[in-house]
């Protein structure tokens, strides 16, 4: 009878060993002879599987790092463009301010000129106040404003005012 129990236990251990896969052979979870009997030869397969998983994770990490660097470069480029546009806008405001101050003396005696200056000032204020405006729309408005200022300067040079 003892022999039958020992033989049965041995058969269970051997059958368990046949049904084992590398994922079930975690030494931190398996203890004792019966728990690890089926893991003979599976540790190296488990180690290879874990190594390939680590390599895949490293590749994913490298890809994510590369993407992060690309995003940072794009962010810096956009910030540079923004600073450039702000500098151009400040220069435009300064030149408009000097042009307006030189025209103010003439405009006091000429109502038509004052009306044109006020119209241009309103458009300039609208462009300055439009933070939510798209870059293309802002550029279009600035081009229109530039044409109107150029037209005004030509009229002034021609002696129209």
Image: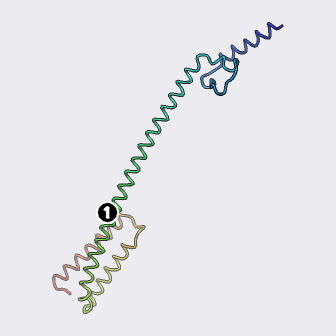
Q: Position of residue 92 (x, y in %)?
A: 29, 72
Count of numbered labels shown in the rendering? 1
Q: Position of residue 98 (x, y in %)?
A: 26, 79
Q: Is residue 21 found left or right of 135 in the rendered image?
A: right
Few, some or many C-alpha atoms within 10 Å of disc 1 (few <14, some 14-19, many ≥20)?
few
Specify how the rendered protein is coloured.
rainbow
Measuring from the top left, give residue 5's x and y in whole percent.
80, 11
Give above or below for 118 relative to 37.
Answer: below
Q: Quadrant of residue 103?
A: bottom left
Image quarter of residue 101: bottom left
Identity of the residue drawn at 16% across and 81% down: 157
Q: Is residue 2 left or right of residue 85?
A: right
Residue found at the very far bottom of the displayed protein: 109
Question: Which of these two is toward me, 141 or 2?
Answer: 2
Residue drawn at 31 percent across, 63 percent down: 84
Q: Residue at x 57, y 24 (%)?
A: 46
Q: Is residue 33 left or right of residue 85?
A: right
86 up-or-down from 74: above or below: below
**Quarter where residue 17 is shown:** top right
Q: Is residue 139 above or below residue 64?
A: below
- Looking at the rendered structure, the secondary structure element under dot 1 is helix
Which residue corresponds to the image point at 23% horizontal and 84% vertical from the top-left? 102
Q: Which residue is mark 1?
A: 84
Classify the position of the C terminus by image quarter: bottom left
Say which quadrant the N terminus sits in: top right
């Amino acid at each position: 009878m003892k022999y039958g129990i020992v033989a049965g236990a041995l058969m269970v251990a051997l059958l368990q060993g046949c049904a084992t896969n590398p994922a079930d052979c975690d030494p931190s979870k398996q203890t004792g002879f019966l728990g690890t009997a089926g893991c003979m030869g599976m540790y190296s397969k488990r180690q290879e599987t874990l190594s390939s998983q680590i390599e895949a994770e490293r590749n994913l990490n490298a890809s994510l790092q590369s993407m992060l660097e690309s995003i940072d470069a794009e962010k810096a480029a956009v910030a540079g463009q923004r600073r450039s546009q702000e500098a151009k806008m400040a220069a435009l405001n300064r030149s408009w301010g000097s042009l307006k101050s030189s025209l103010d003396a003439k405009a006091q005696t000429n109502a038509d000129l004052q009306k044109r200056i006020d119209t241009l000032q309103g458009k300039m204020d609208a462009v300055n106040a439009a933070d939510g405006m798209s870059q293309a729309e802002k550029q279009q408005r600035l081009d229109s404003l530039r044409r109107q200022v150029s037209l005004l300067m030509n009229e002034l040079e021609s002696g129209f005012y």
